[in-house]
Amino acid sequence: MFDPLTFGTEKCTGVEDFLRPEHLITEQDRMVVRTIRDFVDKEVLPHEKEFDDYWDWTEREEHTFIHDLKQKLYVDLGFQKTLIPEEYGGLGMYSLVSANLVVEELVRGDLGLTTEATMNLWGVLPFVPPTPNEYLIKEFAPKLCGDKPFQVASCLTEPQGGGSVEDLALKGKYLQTTCRLEGNEWVINGHKRWPSAYRTADLYRVLCRVEGEEFPRNIAQLYVVADAPGISTSKPYMKMGCNIDTNGDVWFDDVRTPKEYRAHPDPMEDLKSLIVNETLGRAMPTTGKTLGIMKRAYQILKEWVDQREIAGRPMKEHGVVVHELGQIAADIMAAEAFVYSVAYRFDHPEVYGEPWDFKNLVVSDACKKTVGDLGWRMVDRALDLMGSFGYSREGRMEKLLRDIKITQLWVGGPLLYLTELSRYYFGTETL
Ligand SMILES: Cc1cc2nc3c(=O)[nH]c(=O)nc-3n(C[C@H](O)[C@H](O)[C@H](O)COP(=O)(O)OP(=O)(O)OC[C@H]3O[C@@H](n4cnc5c(N)ncnc54)[C@H](O)[C@@H]3O)c2cc1C
């Protein structure tokens, strides 16, 4: 009922009260989101200030709370079987709207934990719909639907650069990790860097150049069990943020894997699936991660401005602060609108085109670039408003600033997104 006397006095009801697309959210999504929210509030956020100290958790001998969180998330809450079809014991969920809702919720707890977990989605995606590889689904469903965490890591980036490997217009020319078919096995040689979750990986997806083949038959995504002879790894890198996710070097020295472990036996299907992986990997769940960090920053900032005073007046009543807070709210809304409009498009290829269309890759690029920039600006602003407390671990905001930076950088890097946009919209041919 419209009441002119109260108009303008209504207040935000929480993180769902920005531009959440309620009309796209199913009852099942709501149930899953509630479960994840409960998990994050009760079991993840109590460790919020500890995560950075555990950057080396995989190198420690003792059992840590990270192991417990992974068991709960991957197995008890079923995260690792999300994409596996129901007939193989999985959840069979492919909606990007649903995926973003879950990721957004989970990342409020910790970006590194979320990144390890979503590596299973990104790593498994190449062999599930839209073009399922029944052999690989059958092969790995028992592990992914089993009672222990099973980790998939994706090895694309190489020492000479991730952008040139992920720039598909370069036609695989700069991929230095090679593979060749010998009898019933692929033999892989090369050096990869940075794969997320590499230290706990049970299975690697490795992007390779096929020896002796020309584009478009020269790029293969091969799966290799992590304990295959010939694989060696470095110690984890010490990073600026996203610390529970482990990143390092992986060397492949005459590593053998079955012929059937290619994401798709048909090279054209394999290439299409790689493009889908790039398109979805950039927009989702990365942008959902950025949005989730923004919402956590909002919660922390709100607590701060609710109690902080400047010159005897509530901080949030000073004109200059009001401007900043208004801008923050607008940035969260803009990010959320972009994330879900793109997720909805990808859920409807019958209207917006196949996920391997170049147009969809550039949509993804624009979304990741813009949402990343909004996220960085928003958290930076929030940190400023908290002064030195924002800059200290106690304030919890500085972690979010460090974490959000990587959501701008990974999967090819921001200049690649702009290059692809420029190629599509202006016919740029550089690089
Ligand atoms: C926490 C974390 C997790 C990661 N997870 C993974 C993972 O799971 N798997 C994996 O393979 N890698 C992963 N990476 C690596 C990441 O994807 C790369 O760092 C990223 O792709 C950029 O590659 P680069 O660092 O080699 O920079 P470069 O390739 O040297 O790029 C530097 C800049 O140049 C631009 N650039 C490069 N090439 C082009 C081009 N052709 N056209 C236009 N611009 C270009 C880039 O966009 C970027 O802005 C991760 C990195 C981090 C920090």
Image: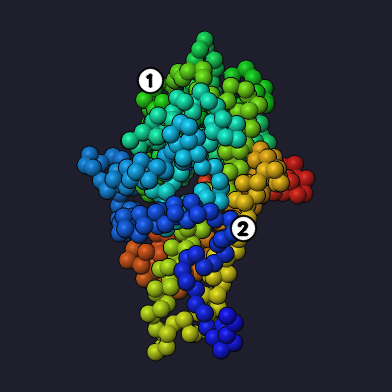
- Image position of 298 with respect to 248: above or below: below
Q: Which residue is mark 2?
A: 338
From the viewer's side, name the closer residue of 286 and 150. Answer: 150
Mark 1 and mark 2 in contact? Answer it, CB < 8 Å.
no
- Image position of 44 with respect to 17: above or below: above
> Which residue: 64% across, 32% down?
272
From the viewer's side, name the closer residue of 20 and 103. Answer: 20
Q: Nearer the viewer, mark 1 or mark 2?
A: 2
> Which residue: 58% across, 80% down?
1
Q: Position of residue 208 (x, y in %)?
A: 55, 27
- The type of residue carrying mark 1 is Pro
Callout 1: SS? loop
Q: Which residue is mark 1?
A: 229
The numbered mark at residue 191 is none
- The type of residue carrying mark 2 is Phe
Graded by Cα atoms within 10 Å as few (under 14), some (14 to 19) or many (20 or more), the crowding at tag 1 reads few
Q: Left or right? Give the position of 42 relative to 301.
A: left
Q: Position of residue 140 (x, y in %)?
A: 44, 28
> Which residue: 59% across, 19% down?
211
The image quadrant in which ligand 1 is located: top right
Please tell me in which quadrant of the rendered image residue 256 appears.
top left
